[in-house]
Amino acid sequence: MRYCSLDNDAGTLYFYFTDLEEGQASAMMEYPAHLLLDAQGAIFGCRLDLDDEVLLSQLELALEWPYNWLDGQYGHLYIRIADEEPAEVVELSDTAVLDLDDDDLVLGIELMLPEEWRAPGRLARLAPLLVPFDDEPIAGEGPVVFGPPASVAVEAEAEEEAAPAEMAAIPHDKWRSGFVALVGKPNVGKSTLLNALLGEKVAIVSPRPQTTRVPVRGILSRPGEQIIFIDTPGIHEPDHRLGKLMVELAERTLPNADVICFMVDISQPPSKLDRMIAQQVQRARGHKLLVLNKVDQKPRQPGANYLPAYRELGEWEMELAISARRRLGLAALLSEISARLPEGPPLYPLDQITDQNEQQLAAEFVREKALFYLQQEVPHAIAIEVEEWIEKETATYIRMTINVEKESQKGILIGAGGGMLKKIGSAARASIERMLGRPVFLDLWVKVRPNWRDDPAALGWLGYRAKNFL
Ligand SMILES: Nc1nc2c(ncn2[C@@H]2O[C@H](COP(=O)(O)OP(=O)(O)OP(=O)(O)O)[C@@H](O)[C@H]2O)c(=O)[nH]1
Ligand SMILES: [Mg+2]
């Protein structure tokens, strides 16, 4: 490794394989990541679980360094500063980013570290390579940032930690509470934002559109206020019954929302879908905020500023430019939302953070890993049923069926020698273990349910029915 650097405000640890010039990194790819820890708990490297989209030739710079290597059988890329076995391998809840140059050569890696992994002790092994982080990842690029700098966002997150008992002592008539809908087209970062606002992973995220299928509630309780965020499926032109339901469920959140965050991707110009959704949002009664996400990303056309085009899509009480992934501008967004909450008592227990149960989340983690590892239509044709969930003495035994629509998809999902299913299973198991805090035995089976996305009966028993979410 050439050097590493920590952006403590955004919680990003950078590993670079070459000296970087400003603006050199021009594209990125995302993969699940793990930290490699030594016996003292210090980070000495990371592991990325790559897929076939990365070519060996792209890893030339990374693999020039002595202790880095690619385990071709599993697609695991190890980035290390020493040749040693890790005492512990820890899964990160956020994906890591490969930074690529114009020739698609991987220049470096960005890891999103939770607070507890940014401690000096954790970085002791990396210290000799650590160079100060030179701020301003978006300096001079892209549109104006309205949000405050990241340090403000981080401080605000830190101060919100109030014990539920303390909050419970506040009389109900002093509370404000309300529903905040996160709506927009697929892939603009709604689920990433929900997770970033809560500081917990309650919604799965993937680089593929149409990741979220049903509304997910994330509850943020702070002294005197409870914000109930509703992450919605991306609104799109559906081409099967499941898609229709996804869009219907997203649209139904609009009339009841106190605040609507219309989310767009500021690195791209508005599309027909953005225009259509903006019009729907305009008809709703709630406060309307225009949330311009991905300010960290360069505009599609160098130098372009798409802000005026988005601004024109409707009447917005406020415009906020943020990066959900880098947690920039979130404190400003939260305070604008907070200022618009109606009076009312908390609607959920103060220690509850989502409306989903552990079984639903576990099934979603499997779907998330499938979205990462599988190509094209296959991950979209997946529906997961939890068949068994048994708390045993040493582990939780979980059996799930992964339904696909075609024999060919079943073949791809299982992979040669069962390799693909194993890869998805082991990545999902790590996420489920992290959530449950105990070992998990995950038993995955694959079944073909022809055409389930267009079959009302199958959709019903797979849990995709409107009345479950009203
Ligand atoms: N560069 C950048 N990428 C982001 C940001 N926020 C989200 N992303 C990426 O955008 C992709 C889509 O994110 P999601 O949160 O799944 O998007 P979504 O709007 O929930 O998508 P659907 O569920 O399909 O509607 C993922 O690859 C995210 O990592 C951001 O602020 N900057
Ligand atoms: Mg989503």
Image: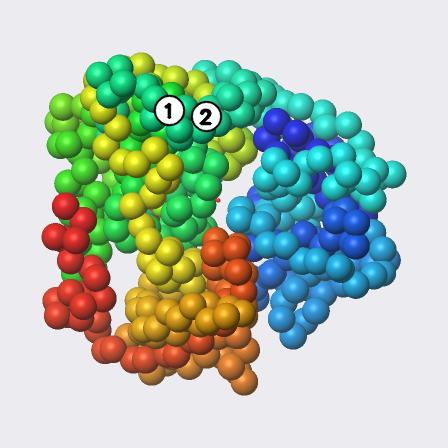
Type of amino acid at the residue the image marks with label 1: Met
Task: Point out which mark residue 371 bears.
Answer: none
Type of amino acid at the residue the image marks with label 2: Ala
Instruction: Point out residue 368 in the picture as x, y percentages from the top left corner.
Output: 43, 58
Element marked by disc 1: helix
Element marked by disc 2: loop
- Viewer-side residue, 155 vs 292: 155
Classify residue 52 as left or right of residue 206.
right
Q: Residues within 10 Å of mark 1 (few under 14, many from 20)?
A: some
Name the quarter showing ligand 1: top left
Classify residue 453 as left or right of residue 199.
left
The colour scheme used here is: rainbow
x 45%, y 25%: residue: 162
Is residue 425 placed above or below 353 in the rendered structure? below
The residue where tag 1 is placed is 167
The residue where tag 2 is placed is 162
Instruction: Point out residue 349 in the picture as x, y percentages from the top left corner.
Output: 30, 36
Instruction: Point out residue 372 in the picture as x, y percentages from the top left corner.
Output: 48, 59
x 62%, y 48%: residue: 98
